[in-house]
Image (spheres, rainbow, N blue to C red):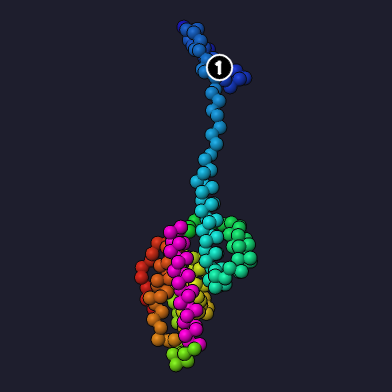
Amino acid sequence: MRATTPLRLTASARVHSLTLADGQVSPPPDAAQVVPAIRPDNTPKRLHIVRRCLLSMLVLSVLWGALTDWRADALVFGIPAVVLGAAIAFLFPHPPHWRLSLRGALVFALWFAVQSVRGAVDVALRAFAPAMGLRPCFRPYPLTLPQGAPRVMFINTITLLPGTLSAEVMGDTLIVHLLDARTDLAPALADLDARIRALFALPHPTEHSI
């Protein structure tokens, strides 16, 4: 009985032969196939960038319009400011726990415009009707929105609501200044909280009251 010849490997990785005990040689395997490179589909990423840019410009446009009373002559500075603000937004990392919602942004923009008008009317009425009286006070409100843009948007929007002002932030508690202590603050801020969550596609936590 003949001894079996050991396995021999050639210098090439494509061709090798195996000598069997009976002297037969197995056919070499097929040459390695070259797999063409597949280009990744960047379409979803591009759509995400375009969507984020448009939503950023929409939110900034509404804020600019509210601050300038929707004056046409303010567009000279407003358009560059909005474009620059949207560009700066891309310099910051996009948090994984929230995203902008197109539907929420449209609903929030309409609501924000209405509240801006209400706030202006409330200030005018208090200026021309001293009999309305003022009972200023401070009230705490627990913050449940995540850190970052959602919480900043919530705090800044409170200042534009009729008779309210964000005075101080102490950890997860916001101190709100009211012109009238008889104002029921909880429903208004709970509604604003829900709208901010819809804007950033955030889930709703358990209800809280103050």
The residue at the point 55 percent across, 36 percent down is 39
The residue at the point 51 percent across, 76 percent down is 159
The quadrant in which residue 33 appears is top right
The residue at the point 52 percent across, 15 percent down is 28
Along the line of sight, which residue is nearer the eye, 69 or 90?
69
In the rendered image, is residue 123 in sight?
yes
Would residue 27 be counted in the magenta stretch?
no
Q: Find the residue positioned furthest to the bottom.
A: 131
Along the line of sight, which residue is nearer the eye, 63 or 94?
63
Q: Which residues are magenta?
A: 101-127
Q: Amino acid at mark 1?
A: His
The x and y percentages for residue 123 are 49, 83
**Main SS category, magenta section:** helix
In the rendered image, is residue 174 in sight?
no
Dot 1: element:
strand
Whether 8 is drawn above or below 78: the answer is above
Would residue 122 be counted in the magenta stretch?
yes
